[in-house]
Image (cartoon, rainbow, N blue to C red):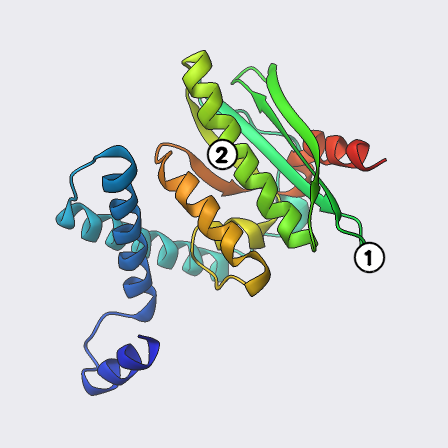
Amino acid sequence: MDRWFLGYKSELPCTPTGELVAEVLWFIWKARNGAIFQAKPPDPQGVVIKALAMNENVENWSRNQQENPVRARDLPSKWLPPDLGSLKINVDGAFVAGTNIGAIAGVCRDSSGVLLGGFASEVEAQSALQAKTLAIIEGLEFAAKWEREKESRVSTLEFDCLTSVQLLLGTDHAPWEVTVLIKKGQAALASLPHICLTHCPKGQNKATDWAVEAQLH
């Protein structure tokens, strides 16, 4: 498909950018999962509108980054609460080099910062990336169960590993070692379309970082 698109694009220079094509495919995939898992009727026009909006946001963000680069010391170092009435889950994962032992943890807090629940467990993993991906999957499964049992909505799932977040959002190519896990995570994310998976600075993820370290020791 990549070869076909590049050949097609070279023949017609006015075709959409590769980034826009990828964004359209991403929203097609999300619509497909919505139809399968939530019986939502496909909305072709909505797919295009969302892709165009995302493309514009990314372009604006890139332009702003070039004009006003963000320095690490400028980033907030404290956990930021979700909107009033919603919940946020922070997750983290770690791996012990030279073993198949990893650990994952997650904490769920409301807009006042009150800890409502969480999870922590040891997992089998072959790399740090596997452990971190498993943390996101467990966080999504925890959110789904929480919403079913507590009837309260989780709006955000946050993680300080940018690579894992980008892989789950489909903005980067998944290494073979996490391909199956990424597909599982993407399916879980598609079944919870109201949850925003976002990246955060490490300083905002201290609680789960501590929980993971405690699980390993």
The answer to whether residue 210 is seen in the rendering is yes
Q: Mark 1 touching mark 2, by CB under 8 A?
A: no
Dot 1 crowding, Cα within 10 Å, few <14, some 14–19, many 20+: few
Q: Label 1, on which residue?
A: 98
Q: Quadrant location of the C terminus?
A: top right
Give residue 207's quadrant in the image.
Answer: top right
Query: For the point 32% across and 54% down, which residue is it?
Result: 26
Q: Which amino acid does label 2 sit on?
A: Leu
Q: Nearer the viewer, residue 213 or 199?
A: 213
What residue sits 63% from the left and 51% below the top?
A: 130
Q: Is residue 126 left or right of residue 178?
A: right
* Helix, strand or loop at mark 2: helix
Using residue 27 as the reference point, say whether residue 175 is left or right of it.
Answer: right
Mark 1 → mark 2, Cα distance in angstroms: 28 Å
How far across and down, in percent of the image, does residue 145 sit? 47, 23
- Determine which residue is flagged by label 2: 140
Instruction: Give the residue displayed 63% in from the left and 43% down from the top.
Output: 201
Q: Crowding at label 2, few (<14), some or many (≥20) Cα neighbours within 10 Å?
A: many
In the picture, which quadrant includes the N terminus? Answer: bottom left
Q: Is residue 90 above or below residue 16?
A: above
Q: Which of marks 1 and 2 is nearer the N terminus?
A: 1
Residue 100 image point, x, y percent: 75, 51
Q: Tell me the SS state at disc 1.
A: loop
Label 1 sits on what residue type? Gly
Query: For the residues carrying marks 1 and 2, which lies nearer the camera in this image?
Result: 1
Would residue 12 appear left or right of 29 to someone viewing this image? left
